[in-house]
Amino acid sequence: MTEEPLFRVVRGTPTAEEVAAIVGALFSLAPPPATPPAPRSHWADSARPGRRRRWSAVAGS
């Protein structure tokens, strides 16, 4: 891999616990991965403004 490291220790020799602490702190700053929105039901979608009504007409009206 030729990727540049995300961070580099410039002084001292950190312990494994110290490296784990800094990695945990850096990951806590990152935004959570985006999740796709849950699909809406046709019933809920029909109540939204600007949506076409898709139900059939009631017989006899």
Image (cartoon, rainbow, N blue to C red):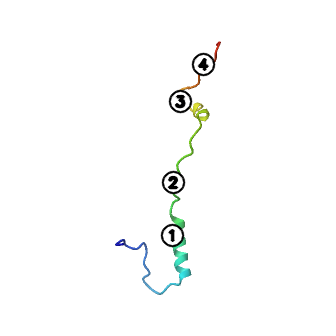
In the picture of the structure, the residue carrying the numbered disc 1 is: 26
Q: Amino acid at mark 3?
A: Arg
Q: Amino acid at mark 2?
A: Ala
Q: Is residue 4 left or right of residue 31?
A: left
In the picture of the structure, the residue carrying the numbered disc 2 is: 34
- Give x and y (percent) for residue 10: 42, 83
Element type at marker 3? loop
- Give x and y (percent) for residue 3: 36, 71
- Give x and y (percent) for residue 17: 56, 80
- Cα–Cα gap, marks 2 and 4: 40 Å
Instruction: State yes or no: discs 3 and 2 in contact (Cβ < 8 Å).
Output: no
Element type at marker 1? helix
Mark closer to the chain start, 1 or 2 = 1
- Give x and y (percent) for residue 31: 51, 60
Outermost residue toward the bottom?
12
- Cα–Cα gap, marks 4 and 1: 58 Å
Q: Is residue 31 above or below residue 4?
A: above
Q: Amino acid at mark 1?
A: Leu
Residue 57: numbered disc: 4
Mark closer to the chain start, 3 or 2 = 2
Query: Label 4 crowding class (10 Å Cα cut-off): few <14, some 14-19, many 20+?
Result: few
Outermost residue toward the top?
60
Instruction: State yes or no: discs 1 and 2 in contact (Cβ < 8 Å).
Output: no
Instruction: State yes or no: discs 4 and 1 in contact (Cβ < 8 Å).
Output: no
Mark closer to the chain start, 3 or 4 = 3
Q: Mark 4 vs mark 1: give the one in front.
A: 4
Q: Residue at x 53, y 82 (%)?
A: 16
Q: Residue at x 59, y 24 (%)?
A: 55
Query: Label 2 crowding class (10 Å Cα cut-off): few <14, some 14-19, many 20+?
Result: few
